[in-house]
Image: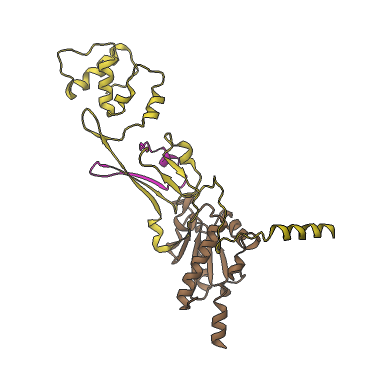
Chain colours: A brown, B yellow
């Protein structure tokens, strides 16, 4: 039973989305990736979940503003290991156009170990899909599961 | 009912609307703004791209041995606004439609477009400099047909002043003096000043 569960659950890494002070551009692209049939991330077994405790892959957008920093870290801590963190857009990766702003605490990898970067302003849905595929690969490696 | 049949008919005819991307090929618009590329053969290092870059993704750093400069664009900071392409006077920097950008964290700081742009020695004094492309020089001197454009693009700014004083100044170049570096510095500026020219004095 346990092995069967293990076999089945790795088919579907659930996604969780954290907005770390994003302008909403990347969030719209994330919604597009999951919610419209054209890009349909659910083919890969992924779907968005409402609780961080159910998540396997976390997608973070936004440059990590001073106001949300503690909350982002708190929510990120709640995601069970092994988790794969994907930085979506240039803001969490380098700060992007907001870099060195007075209210920007980023880049994100000062506080959180990032696994996959998907730069773009915003990245197109196919690019995000590419990132999710890469994240899934890393996630399976961490679980020690061969496909 | 009729509307539903119409939708069904279209679905049967056109097939699924899902883009097959992670499992198959996808479409890319021709004018999609993707990764930045720079052509080191025509870049003249004016730095306008670095100046207009909204995200500060461009770095132009001259090498200490004066052999040229490194032109670097960090894709992880580039916001794909294409201001650099818009403002580049020679069209050296452009955006491709390559959007394959997802990469693991280990490659974060290697995710760059880096090109070495070499300096060329000035034809007269040998100072390392980056020459103007011929097309740009022709455009600049369009209303000055008496200027030999092919010649002056091989000269550094200082030698260009000397060249200008020698050929165009209303004040005659002293025939006895050898047109060398030492003679070239004071004389042309003085000549320009007396002629009421707008050339900057040194």
Q: On the picture, is B61 further left or further right than A71?
A: left
Give coordinates of residue A27: x percent, y percent. Answer: 59, 58
In the figure, A121 relative to A20: above or below? Answer: above
Asked whether A13 or B98 is in front, the reply is B98
Q: On the picture, is B42 further left or further right than A36?
A: left
In the figure, A123 relative to B176: above or below? Answer: below
Q: Is residue A106 visible?
A: no
Q: On the picture, is A144 further left or further right than B199?
A: right
Residue drawn at the location 41% of the way across and 37% of the way down: B48
Give coordinates of residue B158: x percent, y percent. Answer: 26, 26
Q: Is residue B136 visible?
A: yes
Residue that extends furthest to the bottom in the rendered view of this protein: A1
Residue B92 falls inside the magenta stretch: no
In the figure, B176 relative to B115: above or below? Answer: above
Give coordinates of residue A53: x percent, y percent. Answer: 57, 75
Residue drawn at the location 26% of the way across and 14% of the way down: B191
Give coordinates of residue A80: x percent, y percent. Answer: 52, 76
Residue that extends furthest to the right in the rendered view of this protein: B1
Extent of the magenta region: B43-68
Residue drawn at the location 26% of the way across and 11% of the way down: B171
In the figure, B103 relative to B28: above or below? Answer: below
Q: On the picture, is A53 further left or further right than B84?
A: right
Residue B45 falls inside the magenta stretch: yes
- Is the N terminus of chain A in the top left, top right, bottom left or bottom right quadrant? bottom right
Asked whether B147 or B12 is in front, the reply is B12
């Amino acid at each position: 039973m346990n092995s069967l569960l293990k076999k089945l659950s790795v088919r579907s890494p659930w996604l969780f989305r954290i907005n770390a002070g994003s302008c909403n551009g990347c969030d719209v692209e994330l919604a597009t990736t999951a919610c419209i049939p054209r890009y349909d991330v659910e083919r890969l077994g992924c779907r968005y979940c409402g609780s961080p405790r159910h998540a396997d892959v976390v997608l973070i957008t936004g440059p990590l503003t001073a106001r949300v920093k503690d909350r982002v870290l708190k929510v990120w801590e709640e995601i069970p290991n092994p988790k794969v963190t994907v930085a979506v857009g240039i803001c969490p990766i380098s700060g992007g156009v907001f870099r060195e702003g007075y209210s920007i605490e980023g880049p994100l990898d000062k506080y959180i170990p990032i696994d996959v970067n998907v730069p773009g302003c915003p990245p197109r849905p196919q690019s995000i899909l590419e990132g999710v595929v890469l994240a899934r690969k890393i996630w399976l490696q961490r679980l020690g599961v061969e496909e | 009912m009729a509307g539903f049949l119409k939708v069904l008919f279209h679905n049967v005819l056109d097939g699924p609307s899902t883009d097959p991307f992670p499992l198959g090929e996808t479409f890319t618009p021709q004018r999609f703004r993707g990764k930045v590329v720079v052509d080191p053969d025509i870049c003249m290092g004016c730095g306008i791209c670095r100046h207009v870059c909204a995200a500060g993704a461009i770095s132009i750093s001259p090498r200490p041995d004066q052999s040229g400069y490194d032109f670097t664009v960090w894709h992880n900071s580039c916001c794909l606004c294409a201001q650099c392409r818009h403002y580049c006077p020679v069209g050296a920097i452009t955006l491709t439609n390559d959007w394959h950008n997802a990469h693991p964290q280990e490659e974060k700081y290697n995710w760059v477009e880096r090109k070495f742009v070499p300096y060329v020695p000035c034809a007269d004094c040998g100072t390392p400099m980056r020459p103007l492309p011929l097309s740009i020089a022709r455009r600049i001197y369009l209303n000055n047909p008496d200027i030999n454009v092919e010649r002056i693009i091989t000269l550094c700014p200082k030698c260009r002043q000397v060249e200008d004083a020698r050929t165009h100044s209303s004040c005659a170049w002293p025939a006895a003096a050898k047109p060398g570096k030492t003679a070239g510095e004071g004389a042309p500026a003085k000549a320009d000043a007396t002629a009421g020219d707008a050339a900057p004095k040194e």
